[in-house]
């Protein structure tokens, strides 16, 4: 996803060091990625869960329609 907006915040040297250390400790490569995750994390987690549920439901419906279509099919050529 192309990032086109810029947000600037002011922090003290100590605050920046704490944020940076937290980001590194949690495996983030940049402070920006860490801040984005903090700001959007719950929304992103919720969105991922909704997408997982959607895929599960759609996947089951596709399987059910294929299975039900096959089980109802009668091959008259073999009769």
Image (tube, helix red, strand yellow):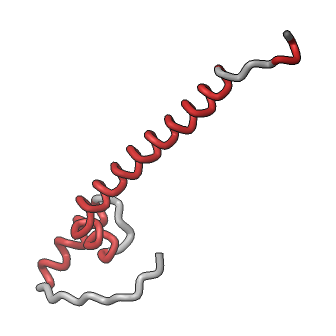
Q: Looking at the picture, does residue 58 appear above or below residue 35?
A: above
Q: Residue furthest right?
A: 77
- Residue 11 at what x, y percent from top left? 13, 85
Q: Residue at x 51, y 37 (%)?
A: 61
- Residue 79 at what x, y percent from top left? 85, 10
Q: Looking at the image, which is closer to me, 36 or 68?
A: 68
Q: Looking at the image, which is closer to me, 14 or 31?
A: 31
Is 71 placed left or right of 8 in the picture? Answer: right
Q: Residue at x 15, y 89 (%)?
A: 10
Q: Residue at x 15, y 84 (%)?
A: 13
Is 46 placed left or right of 79 in the picture? Answer: left
Is 76 placed left or right of 50 in the picture? Answer: right
- Residue 53 at what x, y percent from top left? 38, 44
- Quarter of the image for residue 39 reads bottom left
Q: Looking at the picture, does residue 52 appear above or below residue 23?
A: above
- Quarter of the image for residue 64 reads top right
Q: Residue furthest top?
A: 79
Q: Residue at x 61, y 26 (%)?
A: 67
Q: Looking at the image, which is closer to me, 38 or 50?
A: 50
């Amino acid at each position: 996803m192309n990032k086109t907006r810029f947000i600037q915040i002011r922090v003290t040297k100590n605050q920046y060091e704490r944020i940076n250390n937290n980001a590194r400790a949690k495996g983030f490569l940049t402070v920006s990625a860490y801040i984005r995750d903090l700001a959007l994390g719950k929304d992103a987690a919720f969105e991922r869960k909704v997408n997982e549920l959607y895929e599960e439901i759609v996947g089951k419906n596709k399987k059910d329609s294929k299975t039900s279509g096959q089980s109802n099919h009668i091959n008259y050529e073999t009769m």
